[in-house]
Image (cartoon, helix red, strand yellow):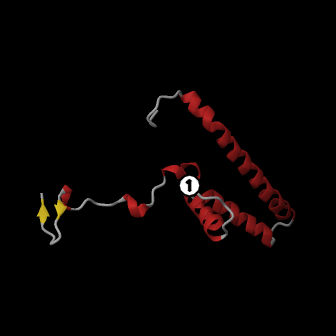
Amino acid sequence: MHSGHRQRASAQLAKRLPASLEHTLFALVVSCAVAIPLGVPAATRPGSWIDHLCRLLVAAGTSLPSFFTGIVLVYVFYDLLGIASSPLGRVAFIYRDPRHQFKMPTGAGRRRGPSGDRRG
């Protein structure tokens, strides 16, 4: 209820659950689409280059922190390849350009005259 209006937690969950399920299902489909074609040849040919590649990917995927992996994936698929949507997603409406976010007031609330002297 931090957003300024009172709403039940169950209503908030019901509102966000479809997007969460969509992302979970999509991740499951993508992971199976990658894992099965790589895993079958790696299992049938132990010690081959594809087996070593799969071991490397699994070791990196389980040992790297998820926030780092996410940043790398955003960089590759959004910045380099340009095939992913903006990483801002549903929070894009609250995004503010950082160049305009930290403007400091001049003169602590006083106006400056044309010659630079303070008028108060």
Relative depth, front residue between 58 and 82: 82
Residue at which label 1 appears: 88
Q: How many marks?
A: 1
User: Could you tell me the amino acid type at mark 1?
Assistant: Leu
Q: Nearer the viewer, residue 84 or 41?
A: 84
Quadrant where the C terminus lies? Answer: bottom left
Residue 54 point in image, percent of width and height:
74, 64
Looking at the image, residue 114 sits to the left or right of residue 76; the answer is: left
* Mark 1: secondary structure: loop
Q: In the shown orientation, is residue 103 left or right of residue 92?
A: left
Query: What residue sits 45% from the left and 60% below the top?
Result: 97
Q: Quadrant of residue 44?
A: bottom right
Task: Look at the picture and state if 30 lies above or below 20.
Answer: below
Q: Residue at x 83, y 60 (%)?
A: 37
Crowd class of label 1 (few under 14; some 14 to 19; many from 20; radius 10 Å): few
Q: Nearer the viewer, residue 24 or 38?
A: 24
Q: Residue at x 39, y 61 (%)?
A: 100
